Amino acid sequence: MKITVFGSGYVGLVTGACLAEVGHDVICNDIDSGKIENLNKGILPIWEPGLEGIVQGNHSQERLHFTCDVKRSVRHGAVQIIAVGTPPDEDGSADLTHVLKVAESIAMHMENSCIVVNKSTVPVGTADKVREKIASTLQKRGVSIPFEVVSNPEFLKEGDAVNDFLKPDRIIVGVNPGADDVRRKMREMYEPFNRNHERIMFMDVRSAELTKYAANAMLATKISFMNELANLSELLEADIEEVRKGIGADPRIGYSFIYPGCGYGGSCFPKDVNALQMTAKGVGFDPKILQAVSAVNDHQKTVLFSKALKQFGSASALRGRKFAVWGLAFKPKTNDMREAPARTLIDALTSAGAIVSAYDPVANDDAQELYSDAPSVHLSSNKYSALEGADALFICTEWQQFKAPDFEEMKDRMSAMVIFDGRNLYSPMKLRGDGWTYHCVGR
């Protein structure tokens, strides 16, 4: 099947590459000529395990193409997938400018009937707007070409996106009633991912749009709930890790997304929870739980800094001190620093006059660009060099290489044996028994 994907960022590139991997003929279009030039050279704009090989392999075998040519792209695909960004607007709602621009471009150049697929994370009702934009543009052209708009949200975890796409637990497809031919074509597109057992779930378009937001909001809610319990556990002198194991054993709850920490980040959870709030308010509904989820997470990102204030006495006591930070990405196995708790912490530390020496196994290059104008932030080449002369270590991302460090070497390099662990990686009893001042979350 010939497929066009608009947007070669995180969602678009993974989608296009994985569809090509199973044999489809895919064009990925992007307005960023530099990005397209790099992709044609095999240079990816994101770091995602397993993606580089798939992109380079399918590009060399001419199943995956990259271009800025909109006309060529539109006329290539029987299926046109919109996978562009929907950044938060000033009020927190999703900005649909890029989505509607792509819809207009499709309508300007389409010659034959096609299926337009919304894969971008968009509010309920976006398919109607895309349909209206395409219809009005076709009308201005004075042509009548049949088309359908489908909602097909992505459920890709950063750090495991390729596996999520190739082995999905469900494929949500929202179609209009009676659009049997559309169902058939969407089933054909996803047939290679559906052979083991039925994964496609067809539903109405608006339900499919809401499903994406509902999934992310539910996961964010679990995280914020556990973080609130963790803060309560500290006051009650309970251990949130024992509580986590106790409630996780209940199959109605499970162990996923109940790890306490220093808050969630990334491109999805913060943006989608806020966008769903705005959608709710737009229809006169007051989303109290969603508001609490965001508020708890915003507060949780400040917990490590608050612990530092308590440890050192005041904000003025931090001035001139050096602090190490392990982990800059919002989660392991990605270089994504958007809304990362580490950024909130670093901003607070440097605002207090502290010096930060940071290290991340993957996100260092991105951090170098982000903090290029911040003289008090230094990027280290490895986790141990970041510790030289540090008054304390802050851990913000649970990378595997941070889980079993050489504590003797850490002790030798640091000026004080103080750790603020935002991911509960170590045993409080062991570290405190070895002489460390160890602050964690909810323990």
Image (tube, grey):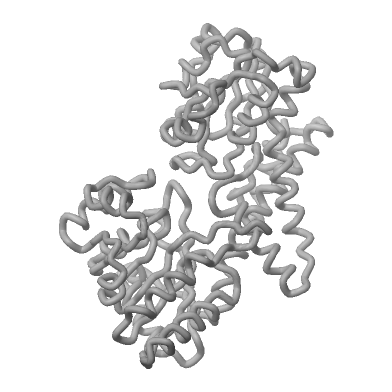
- Height in image: 378 above or below 185? above
Towards the viewer: 20 or 167: 20
The answer to which quarter of the image holds residue 265 is: top right
* Left or right of residue 39, residue 422 in this image: right
For image coordinates 31% across by 50% down, the residue present is 34
For image coordinates 64% across by 49% down, the residue present is 249
- Height in image: 7 above or below 133? above
The answer to which quarter of the image holds residue 126 is: bottom right
Q: Position of residue 292 (x, y in %)?
A: 76, 53
Q: Can residue 7 be seen from the camera position used here?
A: yes
The answer to which quarter of the image holds residue 333 is: top left
Q: Position of residue 378 (x, y in %)?
A: 50, 22
* Left or right of residue 258, residue 295 in this image: right
Q: Position of residue 102 (x, y in %)?
A: 42, 70
Q: Position of residue 394 (x, y in %)?
A: 60, 25
The mark tally for this picture is: 0
Towards the viewer: 97 or 401: 97
